Image (cartoon, rainbow, N blue to C red):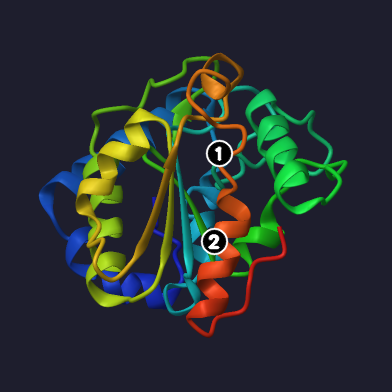
Amino acid sequence: MNVEIHPGWKNELKDEFEKPYFKELISFVKQEYDQNTCYPKGRHIFEAFNRATFDNVKVVILGQDPYHGPHQAHGLCFSVYEDAKIPPSLRNIYKEIEDDLGKPAPQTGNLEHWANQGVLMLNAVLTVRAHEAGSHKKKGWEKFTDRVIEIISAEKENVVFLLWGGPAKKKGAKIDSSKHFILESGHPSPLSAIRGHWFGNKHFSKTNDYLIQHGKRPIEW
């Protein structure tokens, strides 16, 4: 399996691609895709990096692992294909945007327009076996995405990190909070949205306020 990833990211991650754990990870992923139905499609595994290039990243949203149902995952956390049913977590994201910014909820769950504006929509684990949530955990993806966060933290400034839920918050340890803006809340999934203080977090307006303060174009959520 070739690593099809934007040249800017390929340059930043070239050392990582040569490490034994990453080669073992790619070997595992290739075998899984050969023997099972897995998501997203192979060409979309690194879609988050191809949409939000290294030079353009100004916001990072961290998810967990891809949707494991058919015609959902396409390489961007929380996002689904244009004609797919909008998942519950994304509905809650849209509700918060509506409450925070007064923007009505879109009719589609495709978030490519966020990614194209420099929002890196990064799952901690980039692949999954169909109908088996978490099936590709602890195979190396977490180590890889930790490194991605470390590189962004070290080499860029004034990036907004949106950490929703426990696993995302743990990755926050990799971020230099003295030069970046970290926003945390509960996860938007129905089980945790209410008790985890998802609603009312105003992360979308806070993100844009920070970007404007630092001379960057706000995100059109």
Q: Which mark is residue 40?
A: 1
Alpha carbons under labels 1 and 2: distance apart: 28 Å
- Residue 51, picture quadrant: bottom right
Counting the numbered discs, the total is 2
Image quadrant containing the C terminus: bottom right
Question: Could you say which is closer to the camera, residue 32 or residue 55?
Answer: 55
Residue at (57% x, 20% y) in the render? 194
Residue under pointer 2 = 207
> Where residue 200 appears, x then y in whole percent?
61, 37
Residue positioned most to the front: 200
At numbered mark 1, what does the secondary structure look like: helix, strand or loop?
loop
Residue at (63% x, 22% y) in the render? 69
Asked if residue 2 is positioned above or below residue 54 in the image, the reply reads: above
Give, as a three-letter code, the residue at label 1: Pro
Give, as a three-letter code, the residue at label 2: Thr
At numbered mark 2, what does the secondary structure look like: helix, strand or loop?
helix
